[in-house]
Amino acid sequence: MKVLAFVGLSGTGKSYRSLFVAKQNGVDYIIDDGLLIGNNKVLAGISAKKELSKIAAIRRACFFDKEHIEQVKNAIQKYKPDSIMIIATSSEMAQIIRKALELEEINEIIRIEEVATAQEIIKARKIREIEGKHVIPVPTFELQKTFSGYFLDALKVLTKKGDVNFIAEKTIVRPAYSYLGKYIIADTVIKDIVRHVLSKVSSINKVASIDVSKYDDNICVTANIIINYIDLDKSLFPKLQEIVKEEIEKLTCMNVTKANIVIKSIKV
């Protein structure tokens, strides 16, 4: 199976352009926000737009639920697509989805900047931030029975692939989480998670300090520790990095790009 990833930051217009990008690349099946979409129909899955909070929506879109995973995997086995396109906010998120659904390696990553101008991306982000509008690339009647949120409009876009014109029908929605308010994870929460993980390691005498840097949906964490000399084992630290990364991603659904462990001093 040919697997593509269409990536871009949240609210930059990926879902709006997804059908066009799919047609351009000869792809008939799309994974978008927890849904398997094929030939303009929802074939399996649960839309992340149904969730009541942003964090729950991210977990749904990344396929953290086992029943959700099995439902979509069974549909993929049933329809046996030759190719499929994963829509994600980053290449890391695309890989998380690919692994969860046990798809082939990603052959190509297409970025939103390749198909939209800087002005179009800025406009899309403003609409998302101010009006809370989201696009789901299927007709409205496909969503009406299951969607929990506001239907704002049905959207038909005339587009072209080679010499062929076709109409791509989409639905503009406002998910519940976009009008209930913002969901923010404070740096102190990230620090508490890291501190909790490291407190379980007997060879660490003390966690001196933790620094957190956030940009978009990504996190960089640096933990400064004091370690007991008698327990000093260099092989421990790569394992600690993995554990810290996994725990933060599991509990917050944010991508950890760096998990630095710094030995500030050794207690003898």
Image (cartoon, rainbow, N blue to C red):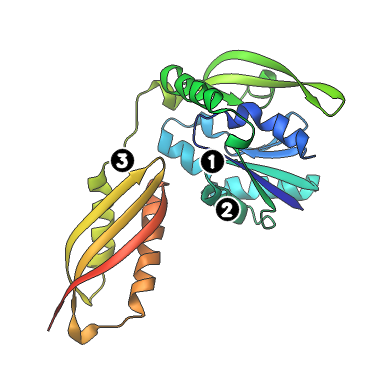
Residue position marked by numbered label 2 in the rendering: 95
Q: Tag 1, which secondary structure?
A: helix
Disc on res. 185: 3
The reply to whether residue 46 is visible in this rendering is no
**Mark 3 vs 1: CB contact within 8 A:** no
Residue in view at x 55 percent, y 52 percent: 96
CA separation, marks 3 and 1? 18 Å
Q: Judge by depth and name the residue closer to the eye, 219 or 81.
A: 219
Within-10-Å neighbours for mark 1: few <14, some 14–19, many 20+:
many
In the image, is 202 to the left or to the right of 162? left
**Mark 2 vs 3: CB contact within 8 A:** no
Residue in view at x 64 percent, y 24 percent: 143
N-term mark: 1 or 2: 1
Furthest toward the right, the residue is 163
Say which amino acid is labelled 1.
Ala
Q: Judge by depth and name the residue closer to the eye, 146 or 179.
A: 179
**Mark 1 vs 2: CB contact within 8 A:** no
Within-10-Å neighbours for mark 3: few <14, some 14–19, many 20+:
few
What percent of the width, then of the height, locates residue 259? 35, 60
Residue position marked by numbered label 1 in the rendering: 61
In the image, is 179 to the left or to the right of 75? left
Say which amino acid is labelled 2.
Gln
What percent of the width, then of the height, locates residue 50? 52, 29
Q: Quadrant of the rendered structure where residue 170 is?
A: top right
Q: Judge by depth and name the residue closer to the eye, 47 or 15.
A: 15
N-term mark: 2 or 3: 2
CA separation, marks 1 and 2? 12 Å
Location of the C terminus (image quadrant): bottom left
Furthest toward the front, the residue is 118
